[in-house]
Image (cartoon, rainbow, N blue to C red):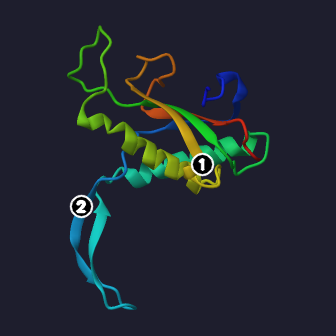
């Protein structure tokens, strides 16, 4: 019994192109304690460690809204969704120029954290009911022009698909 649907059964619903430096979301740093005025409880204050997250999410949200303006169909998308994303990250100046290299440094970001910030930006634009609807993901990090779908500058190409059984 096959649990995954053939690729031909999915339907491309939205293509989003984001220009800007992708930023990972998820690493928090301790910023002290505060007392909740309603309950009186004291709790730790955790803040996002990367200053690049808010600008990246804003770029994703703006690019998603722009894509929605010209996309046919009903939004926000609901039901089981798939996503394909190619993140184009900046190439270090020290990287070899004449051969293919891979974005495996900390500067390029953890793929799971890049997905988190990107999915939140898509949800903020109301392209999907909730990013928990995305059940299948293919994600790639690449340097500019070193992958067939890499951009010439940092950014991302995002494709959202409805999967069999989806409701619009």
Vertical relation: 36 (above or below) 112: below
Residue at mark 2: 29
Query: In the rendered view, does 167 fall on the left or right side of 56?
Result: right
Mark closer to the chain start, 1 or 2: 2
- 98 or 29: nearer the viewer: 29
Question: Dot 2 lies on which element?
Answer: strand
Vertical relation: 128 (above or below) 100: below
The quadrant in which the N terminus is found is top right
Q: Residue at image x 27%, y 82%? A: 34
Residue 133, disc: 1
Determine whether label 1 and label 2 are within 8 Å by CB: no
Foreground tag (1 vs 2):
1
Q: Residue at image x 24%, y 14%? A: 96
- 112 or 100: nearer the viewer: 112
Question: Dot 1 lies on which element?
Answer: helix
- 73 or 53: nearer the viewer: 73
The 10 Å Cα crowd at callout 1, few under 14, some 14 to 19, many 20 or more, is some
Query: In the rendered view, does 81 fall on the left or right side of 102?
Result: right
Picture coordinates of residue 66 (x, y %)?
65, 44
Picture coordinates of residue 86 (x, y %)?
48, 29
């Amino acid at each position: 019994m096959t649990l995954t649907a053939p690729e031909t059964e999915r339907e491309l619903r939205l293509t989003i192109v984001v220009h800007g430096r992708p930023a990972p979301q998820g690493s928090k740093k301790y910023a002290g304690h505060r007392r909740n005025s309603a309950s009186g409880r004291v709790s730790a204050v955790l803040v996002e460690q990367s200053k690049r997250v808010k600008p990246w999410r804003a770029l994703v949200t703006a690019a998603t809204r722009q894509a929605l303006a010209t996309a046919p169909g009903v939004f926000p998308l609901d039901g089981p969704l798939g996503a394909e994303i190619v993140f184009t990250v900046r190439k270090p100046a020290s990287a070899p120029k004449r051969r293919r290299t891979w974005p495996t440094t900390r500067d390029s970001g953890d793929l799971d954290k890049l997905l988190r910030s990107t999915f939140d930006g898509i949800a903020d634009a109301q392209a999907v009911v909730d990013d928990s609807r995305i059940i299948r993901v293919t994600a790639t990090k690449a340097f500019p022009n070193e992958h067939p779908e890499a951009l010439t500058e940092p950014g991302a190409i995002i494709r959202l698909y409805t999967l069999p059984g989806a409701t619009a």
